[in-house]
Amino acid sequence: QSVLTQPPSASGTPGQRVTISCSGISSNIGSNSVNWYQQLPGTAPKVLIYGNNQRPSGVPDRFSASKSGTSASLAISGLQSEDEADYYCAAWDDSLNGPVFGGGTKLTVL
Amino acid sequence: VQLVQSGAEVKKPGESLKISCKGSGYSFSTYWIGWVRQMPGKGLEWMGIIYPGDSDTRYGPSFQGQVTISADKSISTAYLQWSSLKASDTAVYYCARQNWIRGDRWFDPWGQGTLVTVSS
């Protein structure tokens, strides 16, 4: 059972916009910034979004994220086949004194 | 900036193991290095983190006493070790550098992962 809650799956057709939610509590998302990681099949995770809504250089602006209270969401617009991957949210947890992850959302591009 | 991990391992239950994560392209001593487990078909779990500069180490509650995290800053390498492996330790293990700016903390980059298979 992961500390942060994500839907196990999401899907969309090419060109569509999809969103993935992430729910936590006051000691994690409520108090700290949220990061999103993309894990393409058979590869290591890669940071997609850090600090709630900051994109590292090289990440397309089709990816955006937001946070409100103890929830966060990742949005992918103009969906492409190469976006098919697992997406994980994460946040520092003040009670754990370490990061916590969501269970991951498998995105399928139909 | 990159982290390169040691290769895949196949071990028997009860055996010991130490895997490594070598950093390059940055000041290894001044960034925390975390370890993350991914069991087959499952999500990411934080195991612990070490600051190579002074070897300050923190463990996730599920991993305290189960593994040992260490680092040798002279060779820019962090380690994850087990004294007695179990079949349930079968997983891919990732190391990742923790970035910390204005209170935001995130992992980037990640190592390529080390697959550990424990089977009799």
Image (tube, rainbow, N blue to C red):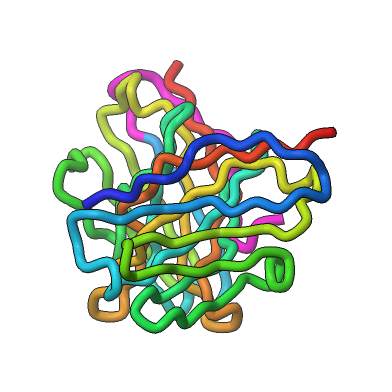
* Residue furthest front as drawn: B74
Residue range of the region highlighted in magenta in the rendering: A1-17
Q: Is residue B72 left or right of residue B48?
A: left
Q: Is residue A9 magenta?
A: yes
Q: Considering only vertical position in the picture, is A60 above or below B52?
A: above
Residue A26 visible? The answer is no
Which image quarter holds the C terminus of chain B? top right
Q: Is residue A29 left or right of residue B104?
A: right
Quarter of image, res B98: bottom left
Percent x, y of residue A56:
20, 52
Quarter of image, res B92: top right
Q: Residue at x 42, y 31 (%)?
A: A40
Q: Residue at x 27, y 49 (%)?
A: B2
Magenta stretch secondary structure, dominant? loop
Residue B56 visible? The answer is yes
Percent x, y of residue B43:
60, 45
Percent x, y of residue B10:
67, 34
Q: Residue at x 36, y 53 (%)?
A: B22
Looking at this view, is A17 or A44 the one in front? A44
Q: Considering only vertical position in the picture, is B26 above or below A40?
A: below
Q: Considering only vertical position in the picture, is A64 above or below A2?
A: above
* Residue furthest left as drawn: A57
